[in-house]
Amino acid sequence: MSNYFVLECYGPEDEDRAAIGEIIDEPEVSWNLGRQISDKVKTPIEVHLDPDEPGVLLPMFERNVLLMRDDMLAVLRACGVDNLQLFDAVVVDPATSKRHTNYKVVNIIGLVACADLKKSVYTAYRDPPMLDTDFDVLAIDESKIADVSFFRLAECVSAKLVHRRVKEALEKSVPMLNFVPPEEWSG
C-alpha cells in the first residue's frame, strides 16, 4: 500500500463544475518544471472561467497554470508543505463579472523521479522517461522520495503526489479533492 496519492480535483458528481477559460496576459514561464520562477510575474494573474462551462468553483484547477484556493493552501502549509511559490490571482466569472480573489497560482518547487519503471506500464517519449511520460499504471518507489510530502512526478509533471498525512488533512477540510492511488492513476 502506497503512502502517496495522485492529487486530482474532479468536482461534484451531481453538479456541473466550472472550467478555466482564458488566462489574461499569461506569463511566459514554465509552471511545471519544478524550478523557482525568477522572472518578474505581473500579479494578480487574471484567470477567466469558461463561459461555456459554468458550474461549481473547485478548490483546485489546472489548465496551463495550477490554481489553488486559499483554504487548501492553508491546509498544505499547516502540514509543513513549504515548496510552493505563490502568485496572487483573480478568477473572473465572465457571466456575472464576479471576481474571486481567494485563489493563488501555484508553482510546485521540485520534481521527484520516483516512478518504478519496472513495475509501471507506460509510454515514454524520451530516454530516460522524463516530464511527459504517459502512464497506464504508475508504481512508486518510495525509497527515492526522501522527506517530501507534496511534489510533481519528474517522469510525468502533470502528476501531483501527496503523502498520506497531507491527503488525510485535506480530506478533513477541503471538499471535492480526489486522491488516486498511483496504481489506479493514468495520465
Image: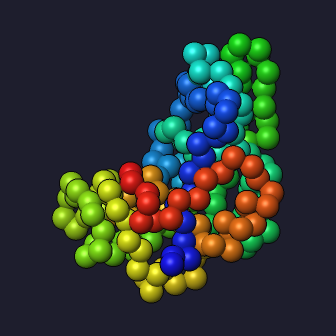
Residue at 63% x, 37% y is 13
Q: Is residue 119 left or right of residue 93?
A: left
Residue at 66% x, 51% y is 177
- Expressed as whole percent of the image width and height from the top left, the position of residue 140 reads 41, 74
Residue at 69% x, 16% y is 94
Say above or below: 42 vs 85. Answer: above
Say above or below: 64 vs 1. Answer: above
> Can the viewer see residue 46?
no
Q: Residue furthest front?
A: 14
- Expressed as whole percent of the image width and height from the top left, the position of residue 84 reads 64, 61
Q: How many numbered circles are shown?
A: 0
Q: Is residue 40 left or right of residue 185?
A: right
- Expressed as whole percent of the image width and height from the top left, the position of residue 85 reads 63, 57
> What kind of colouring is applied to the model shown?
rainbow
Q: Quadrant of residue 66?
A: top right
Which residue is more in the foreground, 112 or 25? 112
Q: Is residue 89 left or right of residue 36?
A: right
Say above or below: 1 vs 100. Answer: below
Which residue is more in the foreground, 176 or 86? 176
Residue at 45% x, 86% y is 143
Q: Quadrant of residue 138?
A: bottom left
- Expressed as whole percent of the image width and height from the top left, the position of residue 88 reads 72, 43
> Can the viewer see residue 52?
yes
